[in-house]
Image: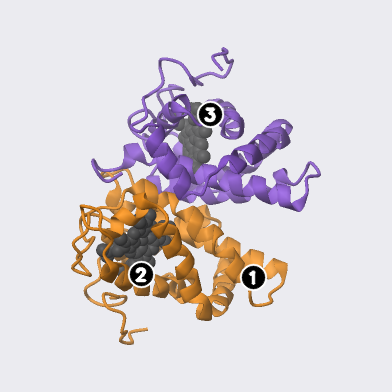
Chain colours: A purple, B orange
Amino acid sequence: MATKTLIPGYTYGTEQVAKSPIGLEDLNKLKTTVMFTSADEEALRMAGDVLEDQVEDVLDVWYGFVADHPHLLAYFSTPDGHPIQEYLDRVRERFGQWILDTCRRPYNQEWLDYQQEIALRHTPEKKNVTDNANSVDNIPLRYVIAFIYPVTATLRPFLAKKGHSADQVEAMYQAWFKSVTMQIALWSQPYTRDGYW
Amino acid sequence: MATKTLIPGYTYGTEQVAKSPIGLEDLNKLKTTVMFTSADEEALRMAGDVLEDQVEDVLDVWYGFVADHPHLLAYFSTPDGHPIQEYLDRVRERFGQWILDTCRRPYNQEWLDYQQEIALRHTPEKKNVTDNANSVDNIPLRYVIAFIYPVTATLRPFLAKKGHSADQVEAMYQAWFKSVTMQIALWSQPYTRDGYW
Ligand code: HEM
Ligand code: HEM
């Protein structure tokens, strides 16, 4: 997995990535809380194959959703409200990679560390740094949590597009829902008061 | 809605409730972020009727889930790990009321204020106070977020038990998912660093 990537700012598995505040034992507790099992891992592998050639279409939907909501587009914009196209474009590539990582990466310590890195990139600690963007410096936690819904619900039609059975589509969808919820639980860490996470 | 209730510690609509940090305009932004519309309000009203006489069965599932996971049961236990039955019982009644409130209450300022009250009751500021419980004083935010999954997924079979069409069940389920996600976004406020929420 240490292959070089051509996506600017995508530092998965490198020395530059933050360290997660938790280890595999705590991750396991989180997994059981979202009812995540090895069957979900398998369903996500299947979802990876289903989504692989649809990533751009999925991103069109999500970016369209953000663009339609000024209170969301603001976080890809300058402080005085002008959207920054280069920032949008660069993040989009990493967002696409994340879809496949969610499906295909083993959820190990390296993965946990990159979760922390993504988390920090939504907060004042690292927002804008990767892309040298002249944007506002924090994405409010409440919107990050709220985004669980669109990122889950709008994926479902794409999971159904490759002729899998209703049961298989449902299994992929639930596995995705669990994983996204778990990841946002992880991403909440740098937002949280000391000792409250 | 100012009727007296017999549920101990349930203070909805009273002077004792905390004040929400946000108003209806910000709530509206949150609603659009979880794609919540008036169709969801209607679906939740229907869900209220479907769930009304199943509340105890739903609570059996959720309490069973907590009881099966020592890392969750710990938050209803003494600091040295003994579950507190009276605490479990008292919270259970308010939890049941919350199911119906989620379906039936108008999401107005009074509702926002009680969201803040529930949030605080999961944190050191108010945990244990309502029931005078001798328990640990914080529920980690990551578990509160993770709990979105079981509280959503396990509800689905109950929504399907009253003979509604597949489309109606799906509409109720999605509306519930949106509402729970939005509520947890609200509940994250007292956990969050100043300015990060
Ligand atoms: C379910 C919730 C969310 C998911 C899954 C998600 C996913 C991602 C991913 C995968 C990245 C790129 C990570 C990397 O650098 O490798 C990213 C970055 C970013 N996201 Fe999110 N995001 C979520 C919520 C939000 C919300 C609500 C906004 C507000 C519009 C937002 C705005 C951004 C921005 C501006 C960046 C670039 C941050 C930087 O400067 O590096 N995200 N997000
Ligand atoms: C989706 C996430 C959650 C929901 C919807 C939820 C719902 C509720 C509700 C409705 C109440 C009663 C509020 C009132 O006093 O009127 C409550 C209290 C409580 N919940 Fe949660 N909860 C969630 C996550 C958790 C988690 C992960 C735990 C950990 C086991 C937990 C443990 C408790 C405890 C101990 C209380 C009593 C707090 C007190 O001392 O007043 N909750 N919850």
Disc 3 residue type?
A: Val
Mark 2 residue element? helix
- Residue A50 lies, with reference to residue B182, above or below; the image says above
Which residue has dot 2 on it? B109
| Residue drawn at x 54%, y 51% as measured from the top left | A149
Which residue has dot 3 on it? A91
* Residue A162, image x, y percentages: 79, 41
Task: Mark 1 vs mark 2: give the one in front.
Answer: 1
Q: Is residue A167 visible?
A: yes
| Residue drawn at x 41%, y 50% as measured from the top left | B145
- Residue farthest toward the top in the current orientation of the protein: A4
Q: Are marks 3 and 2 in contact (CB under 8 Å)?
A: no
| Residue drawn at x 21%, y 73% as measured from the top left | B16
Is the CB of the residue bearing disc 3 within 8 angstroms of ligand 1? yes
Disc 1 residue type?
A: Ala
Task: Mark 3 vs mark 1: give the one in front.
Answer: 1
* Residue B126, image x, y percentages: 21, 61
